[in-house]
């Protein structure tokens, strides 16, 4: 008799523990999905704005880098500038 009660008690405790873990996992999953929805919607305040150069100096530097890349590609292709 006591063995049957012990088995039933352990089974109920195991099911209760499984229910708690499942509930916690489901809550975490829903939170993660909400976070991803917010990030995709662009409403997240920590998301950086568009990566456009803000000032003239950055634009000049970007143009210089593009010119260097163009020259390196020409050298790699064997074109004499």
Image: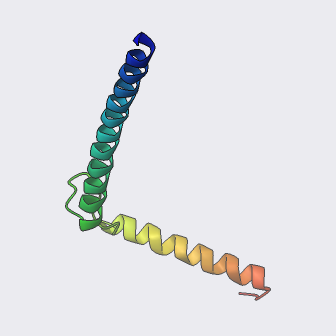
Decide: is 23 above or below 55: above
Decide: is 14 above or below 30: above
Of residues 20 and 40, the one nearer the viewer is 20
x, y percent for residue 33: 30, 56
Residue drawn 34% across and 40% down?
22
x, y percent for residue 80: 76, 87
Name the residue at the front extreme. 1
Of residues 31 and 77, the one nearer the viewer is 31
Count the marks: 0
Residue 68 horizontal side relative to residue 42, left or right: right
Q: Quadrant of residue 24?
A: top left
Q: Quadrant of the C terminus?
A: bottom right
x, y percent for residue 16: 32, 30
Residue drawn 30% across and 33% down?
20
Residue 34 horizontal side relative to residue 62, left or right: left
Residue drawn 31% across and 58% down?
36
Residue drawn 19% across and 61% down?
43
Name the residue at the top extreme. 2
Decide: is 32 above or below 49: above
x, y percent for residue 53: 34, 67
């Amino acid at each position: 008799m006591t063995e049957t009660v012990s088995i039933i008690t352990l089974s109920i405790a195991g099911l209760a523990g499984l229910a708690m873990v499942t509930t916690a996992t489901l809550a975490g999953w829903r939170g993660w999905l909400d976070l991803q929805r917010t990030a995709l919607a662009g409403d997240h305040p920590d998301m950086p704005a568009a990566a456009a150069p803000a000032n003239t100096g950055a634009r000049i530097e970007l143009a210089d880098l593009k010119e260097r890349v163009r020259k390196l590609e020409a050298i790699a292709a064997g074109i004499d500038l």
